[in-house]
Amino acid sequence: MAYSEARSLTPTCISKRVDAKWVPPHVRLRRVEAGGSGGCVVDTLTPTERSAQMARVRDRDTAPELRVRRLAHHLGYRYRKHRSDLPGRPDMAFIRCHKAVFVHGCFWHRHDCAAGRRLPKSRLDFWLPKLEGNRARDVSNLARLRADGWDVLVIWECETGNADVLAERLRTFLNA
Ligand SMILES: [Zn+2]
């Protein structure tokens, strides 16, 4: 069955893949190169400039998020992205099955990994509340979504390096 046919036959947000193993070559994920978001940041900007830059950097369609979204799409799942009526505007929302996926940058969302624990070398008084605020907001958004009956999956940037592992996580979460 052609991919397009498979699409048209699968109206729900959980649709079957054409082939359980196959992932298009351009979707095969490469290991995330170190230092993509964070690293040893020496801050030379004013808080206002930094805030504006941070808003741009943290905005939608970051590389890890794109990788996950493309993979989900090629696995046959259909979703809405950044639904602003949902807490935290999940990167992917599978409306009918009430499942939401966030792809979080380790640095920005303070993941408990090497990249997430790293802090800028300067302006810590500015950065730490900012980053902790992100984390607190994430916790609150997840709680609100779950209270509304949503299943939520958080995929960390450092977990997006292996396409096969990632595909399995998505399948397990979305088919449950
Ligand atoms: Zn991480």
Image: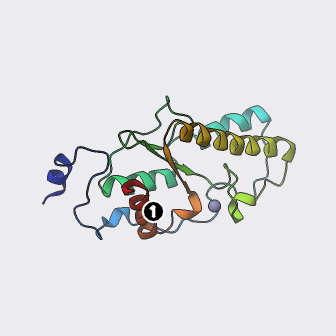
Give x and y (percent) for residue 155: 54, 56
Which residue is disc 1 drawn over? 169
Q: Residue at x 35, y 40 (%)?
A: 96
Give above or below for 37 relative to 34: above
Q: Is residue 121 left or right of residue 30?
A: right
Along the line of sight, the residue nearer the viewer: 43 or 7: 7
Give above or below for 42 relative to 148: below
Ligand 1 rendered quadrant: bottom right
Along the line of sight, the residue nearer the viewer: 73 or 154: 154
Give x and y (percent) for residue 132: 76, 45
Q: Residue at x 43, y 67 (%)?
A: 163
Q: Is residue 128 left or right of residue 34?
A: right
Q: Residue at x 40, y 56 (%)?
A: 176
Report the residue that reaches farthest toward the top: 85
Residue 143 appears in view? yes
Dividing the image into 4 quarters, which one contains the N terminus?
Answer: bottom left
* Quarter of image, res 137: top right
Give above or below for 33 relative to 47: below
* Quarter of image, res 79: top left
Label 1 crowd (10 A; few <14 / some 14-19 / many >=20)? some
Residue 39 appears in view? no
Q: Is mark 1 within 8 Å of ligand 1?
A: no
